[in-house]
Image: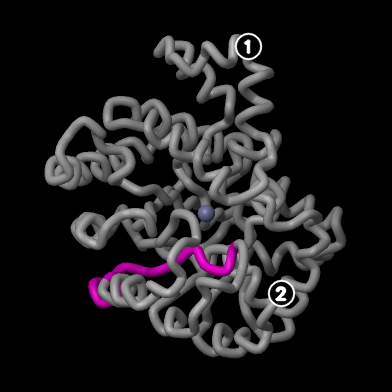
Amino acid sequence: MALYADLHRHLGGALHPRIIYKFLQRQDHHILSYFPDYDGFYSWFTRPCRTLEEFVKIHTLVEELQSLEHLPYFCLRLCRGAYTFENLQYLELRYNPYFRTDKNLSTAKRIGQMKLIVETITANLRPADYPIIVKQIVMLDRRLPLEINEAILQVAKDHIGPVVGIDIGGPEIEPGKYEVWVELLAKGRANGLKTTCHLGETSLANVHEQYFPVLDRIGHGIHIPLLKPEMLSELAKRQITLEVCPTSYRQTGVLKDLGDLRSVFSRCREAGVAIAVCTDNPGRNPAPCTLPGEYERLIDHDVIEFSDLKQIQNEAFRSAFGFVGSSRG
Ligand SMILES: [Zn+2]
């Protein structure tokens, strides 16, 4: 049995919609007044969005459900699903700890609660019956003030071990502010954290070459090979891997057809830039969206050949932030 590694998956988008729906039923959640049956909820939850902003709105709803009290419920379910249905040997799970703190608290108290969020997630990502290795990437967010992002970086530094890296997420707003993000990523790196950043997902607007010296990987970055392939040699030189999440681009309205990824893969291959195929938010995609399913869809759309699979799978293990040992693929 081949075993896989997924390097880009959000805690807020990792869960099957049925798990979320059952949770909402248990809580007698008010949102169920809009969705008296599962089918209606499923269609709403997994529908393609026109823009990334629209997609992120539903994400926010799930983040709010994943409060301190309920994190164990969600963590167990996502680990056992990833191991049982996707044959994942290794998973890097990313989340913003601040968005899971209690909204009724003051900012200072919410910042203080982030430690508990990370510790609760850490304690619940080691399910005894499912021998999957799960490491964490802690996310900063473009919508949050610097003070909170610095506190998120601090909590990541304080939990190196279970936390292996940092990422920057949120809608691709204020592209001119890149110096702030570059500095935060550099600080993370100087403190032993690996770095990735959501860049070049919907356009080239927030891609600045100043990011490259402080990044180990790029979340998506597909608009670099699509629109500015001359930048690829710099990525190759710095051994920066692109995390490419095929179905996600249809769900967020970025690509109309997965065949559009053909030039992404061929240009990266020519330039010597590694690609790790990942799932991003598999629970938000029409089921079944699994990592092996993403490989299959890429072959279906003539983006890759079956014979490329082994190398792409190896690339994911090689680009992992916290994987030691050998893949059992
Ligand atoms: Zn993402």
Question: Measured along the vertical axis of the image, is residue 8 above or below residue 196?
Answer: above
Secondary structure at badge 2 equals helix
Q: Which residue is mark 1?
A: 37
**What is the number of callouts on the image?**
2
**Few, some or many C-alpha atoms within 10 Å of disc 2 (few <14, some 14-19, many ≥20)?**
some
Badge 2 is on which residue?
Answer: 226
- On the rendered structure, is 123 left or right of 136? left
Marks 2 & 1, CB-CB < 8 Å contact: no
Question: Closest to the observer: 246 or 131?
Answer: 246
Alpha-carbon distance for marks 2 and 1?
Answer: 41 Å
Q: Please report the residue visible at 63 percent of the width from the left and 56 percent of the height from the top.
A: 245
Instruction: Tell me the magenta residue range.
Output: 188-201
Residue appearing at x 52%, y 69% in the figure: 218
Q: Position of residue 109 (x, y in %)?
A: 13, 41
- Answer with left or right where residue 117 lies relative to residue 233: left
The one of 258 and 312 positioned closer to us in this rendering? 258
Q: Is residue 233 above or below residue 182?
A: below
> How far across and down, in percent of the image, does residue 264 sit?
72, 72
